[in-house]
Amino acid sequence: MTERSSMSALIIELRGMVHAGIEEYTVFGIDYWSNEQLQAILDRNRIDLYRCQLDKVPRTAAGGAVQYFDHWITGYDHFERTDGGTAIFYIEDAAGNDQGTALWSADYNVGLVTFAQDTGGTALYVTARSYDLPGAAAEVWRQKTGHFAAGPEGFDFSTDNMSVKRSQRVEQAQYMANYYAGQMRPKVTQIFRSDVNAGSNY
């Protein structure tokens, strides 16, 4: 798998959260952690949005006129950046007309799209990929826990003048996995009861 250039900012941020070097250590001849490995974990912790309606934020201009420049992708953050095409992050109107990247800018971290011109309250929709960075960080730290515990250096030892407790790496990795797991996005699902009312969701 090849690293996508549109993922570089997310990979850098994830590296900082998990303190992962490009060749931090080797397991059975495989170096950890490459950009491709981190991208694969990020992709396992993503939600694909299709035509999710943007929330308009009104501004009051001189004379009391209401204008609309800012539009939020409510409930989501940490988006993969556009590569200039129409497959990753793009904006459409209700008729499906693409709103080109020359018309707007985006804060991909928080999910804010700002148009250069007043959109007049037009309904706008985004298709995008949103990533659960804490979920991805928790997964990396869980893998690190296993690597540290099972590796050849996962034991404590003592000499006459010092004591080395390598097991602390395992404990620290477990702590960080739990820390980020507590910040993960909640998982939501719908439960269907066929015995009560067919076609209803609860």
Image (tube, helix red, strand yellow):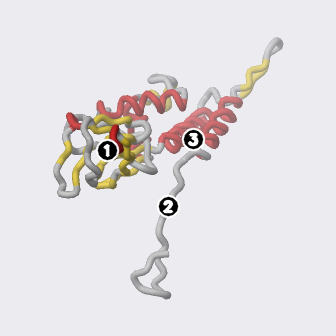
Q: Residue at x 45, y 76 (%)?
A: 201
Q: Which residue is mark 1?
A: 67
Q: Earlier in the sequence, mark 2 or mark 1?
A: 1
Direction from residue 54 to residue 101 in the image, left or right? left
Q: Residue at x 46, y 30 (%)?
A: 13
Q: Which residue is mark 2?
A: 188
133 or 77: which is nearer to us? 77
> Separation of disc 1 and disc 3 at Cα?
47 Å
Q: Which residue is mark 3?
A: 142
Q: Earlier in the sequence, mark 1 or mark 3?
A: 1
Amino acid at the residue labelled 3: Arg
Q: Residue at x 82, y 12 (%)?
A: 161
Looking at the image, can residue 1 be seen?
Answer: no
Label 3 SS = helix
Q: Residues within 10 Å of mark 2 (few under 14, many from 20)?
A: few
| Vertical position of residue 121 compared to residue 194: above or below | above
Quarter the N terminus occupies: top left
Q: Residues within 10 Å of mark 3 (few under 14, many from 20)?
A: many
